Amino acid sequence: MGFFSLGLINIIGAGPVGLHCGTLLAEEGFEVTIFEEHQTVGRPVQCAGLISRSGIEELGVELGNSVINEVKGAKIFSPNGESLTIQRPSTVAYVVDRFLFDQMFYKKAKRLGCEIKTDCKLIDIRAKLNDNSSLFLQNKGRGELIKSKITIGADGANSVVRHSVFPGVLEKEFVHAIQIRAEGKFNPDLVEMHFGDFAPGFFAWVVPESKRVARIGLAVSLGLNAGNSMKQFLEQKQFSIRTLSKSSALIPISPPLKEISSGNILLVGDAAGHTKATTGGGIVFGLRATEVCADTIANHLKHQHSLDAYSKNMQGINKELNLHWKLHSYIQAMKPGQFNSMLLKAKNAGIEEFLQEHGDMDRPSSFMKKVLFKPKMWGLLPAVIRTM
Ligand SMILES: Cc1cc2nc3c(=O)[nH]c(=O)nc-3n(C[C@H](O)[C@H](O)[C@H](O)COP(=O)(O)OP(=O)(O)OC[C@H]3O[C@@H](n4cnc5c(N)ncnc54)[C@H](O)[C@@H]3O)c2cc1C
């Protein structure tokens, strides 16, 4: 083992969530160290980089030069190829360069005084209730032991913090995603979502960077072969493309976790399953959860409030995440024939115009209740009631 030190707040993982959490806590005047296993923050990139405009504006995060495209809506395809188009005249979501996006958070965290140690991987964590935890790290290949007053696991879907402190939690609730960046011909204004037997348990997507380049991906239930599914999807849809790069990773898809803190250890972001089960998007919700996490810690250190309040403080966000989970479960329980007729029914009921006006990709609750006040949409009420 190398040296032995006592840090106040230690964050594992320099993804957007860990870095934002560090920034918020440093702004409150706390001493923060962030550990990142990779040499460069933001690499490797494993994300489609689609972020809702409303979500990011609400968070007050400036996207700067990370935005590479702005989309106005989405086209949703049912298994038989029938489609719905929800398009607005103005931007509804941004497509970001995830490397530049993460680097933006990195620079801000550094500017505010966070110490960020790259090439430094958490191997294990030992916790004693209400006492400092011991963090076992590999720092540029050398073992290092750190005593930590408060530890935040922002170490993504495969979180070592979660595995060590919450064994058995979020063990199998993932989809396996695969994504390529490809050259071809795309509609730069619309994101595509394709449901079908090529993506059992989830769906396939096309997120355009421009007319010429898009991120094409899909995810499948854990244990299935995502690579074969991707091949099947590309063949079935007859994309004429040239692959530029390829990546693959896990996305947590689960109802909100009950256990996200234990003693002085808290989980946030993908490590805590803070992703929308409908789409797998975790940036906006991870950043929202970060605000709650940082606030809970600040109240603990300044006013001796218990860290156990974290779970309760997450209730508002969890309510929305739970609705995403229910919608996801409802959609995935449908047989292809049911999905096709549901989409047709929704289209005939005027769902495209309805969602154009009321849709919010982060907050299904905002438009689901409005269905009640639109007689044309009442044919969809059984579905709404079952999910709500
Ligand atoms: C294919 C794909 C497409 C996606 N598309 C979208 C999308 O379009 N929109 C969206 O909102 N979300 C999307 N997501 C989800 C999104 O990428 C995550 O929700 C988001 O990155 C979560 O941020 P985070 O900081 O919690 O975790 P991460 O971004 O995963 O960051 C965790 C960090 O912790 C580090 N780390 C891990 N283990 C250790 C360790 N032991 N020690 C030290 N450091 C460690 C990692 O290197 C990483 O830097 C997608 C995910 C995938 C896989």
Image (spheres, rainbow, N blue to C red):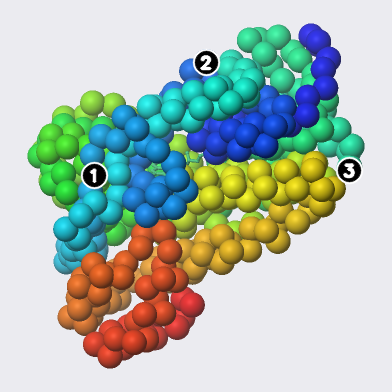
Image coordinates of residue 77 in percent, x first then y, are 22, 61
Vertical position of residue 361 compared to residue 124: above or below = below
Instruction: Please say if 176 is above or below 197.
Output: above
> Can you tell which of label 1 and label 3 is closer to the viewer?
1
* Mark 1 residue crowding within 10 angstroms, few (<14) / some (14–19) / many (20+): many
**Residue at numbered disc 2:** 39
Circle 2 — which element? loop
Give percent across and percent down for residue 222.
49, 48
Q: Quadrant of residue 78?
A: bottom left
Q: Is residue 190 left or right of residue 320?
A: left
User: Which picture quadrant has residue 113?
Assistant: top right
Which mark sits nearer the N-terminus, 1 or 3?
1
Crowd class of label 2 (few under 14; some 14 to 19; many from 20; radius 10 Å):
few
Where is residue 4 drawn, in percent x and y? 83, 15
Left or right, 284 with respect to 196, comes to: right
Q: CA distance from mark 3 to mark 2?
A: 32 Å
- Structural distance between the alpha carbons of marks 2 and 1: 30 Å
Amino acid found under the numbered disc labelled 2: Gln
Of 213 and 232, the residue lying toward us: 213
Residue type, numbered disc 3: Leu
In the rendered structure, which disc, 3 or 2, sits on the residue that comes first in sequence? 2
Residue located at (30% from left, 49% from top): 93
Q: Residue at x 63, y 34 (%)?
A: 27
- Label for residue 179? none
Which residue is label 3 attached to? 129
